[in-house]
């Protein structure tokens, strides 16, 4: 099996695991910061993935403040900032679960984009296909 195919299969199999979620906090801003790698490669990121993330560089989306972040040249992270209040934080576990589900969904989107770039000609995405 070629190295390219092995890399794609490893990416598809290795969806983000809940144990990969990193939780940090900023007491000054009163936010929890959740982060998880959603796409990685052994070499450099495919150009379509870089473009997808760069286009959304200054955009945040809901829930809370969620955005993509590229680490180096090989990893894309999903980051979410959740406001907190001192004392009991209701439904924080549920928010982490929702973040994990979102990360899995984003992982599948980025994997599909990478596969389309790699096999564009085989999937007839590089030409006008007419019946």
Image (cartoon, rainbow, N blue to C red):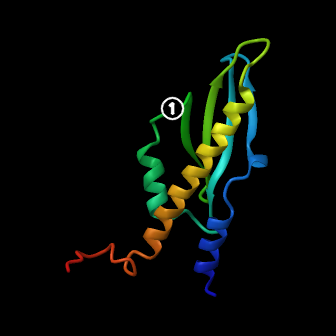
Position of residue 13 relative to residue 6, above or below, is: above
Left/right placement of residue 26 relative to residue 8 reads right
Position of residue 103 measured from the top left corner of the image (x, y, whole percent): 61, 47
Rendered view: 91 above or below 10:
above
Residue at image position (37%, 79%) is 121
The residue that label 1 is drawn on is 62
Front residue of 113/53: it is: 113
Number of numbered discs on residues: 1
| Quadrant that contains the C terminus | bottom left
The spot of residue 129 in percent (x, y) is 24, 77
* Screen quadrant of the N terminus: bottom right
Q: Residue furthest bottom?
A: 1
**Can you say whether 76 is above or below 127 in the image?**
above
Circle 1 packing at 10 Å, graded few (<14), some (14-19), many (20+), is: few
Residue placed farthest to the left in the image?
130
Q: From the top left corner, tell me how far across and down residue 112 is, in percent.
A: 49, 63
Mark 1: which secondary structure? loop
In front of the other: 131 or 2: 131
Q: Quadrant of residue 44?
A: bottom right
The residue sitting at the top extreme is 86
- Against 123, is 96 above or below? above
Q: Residue drawn at (40%, 81%), measured in percent from left and top?
A: 122
- The x, y position of residue 58, in whole percent, is 45, 36
């Amino acid at each position: 099996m070629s190295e390219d195919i092995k890399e794609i299969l490893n990416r598809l199999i290795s969806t983000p695991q809940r144990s990969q979620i990193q939780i940090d906090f900023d007491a000054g801003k009163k936010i929890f910061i959740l982060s998880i790698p959603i796409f990685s490669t052994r070499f450099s990121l495919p150009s379509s993935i870089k473009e997808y993330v760069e286009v959304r560089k200054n955009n945040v989306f809901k829930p809370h403040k969620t955005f993509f972040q590229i680490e180096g040249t090989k990893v894309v992270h999903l980051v979410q900032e959740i406001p907190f209040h001192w004392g009991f934080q209701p439904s924080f576990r549920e928010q982490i679960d929702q973040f994990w589900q979102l990360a899995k969904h984003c992982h599948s989107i980025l994997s599909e984009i990478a596969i389309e770039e790699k096999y564009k000609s085989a999937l007839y995405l590089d030409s006008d296909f007419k019946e």
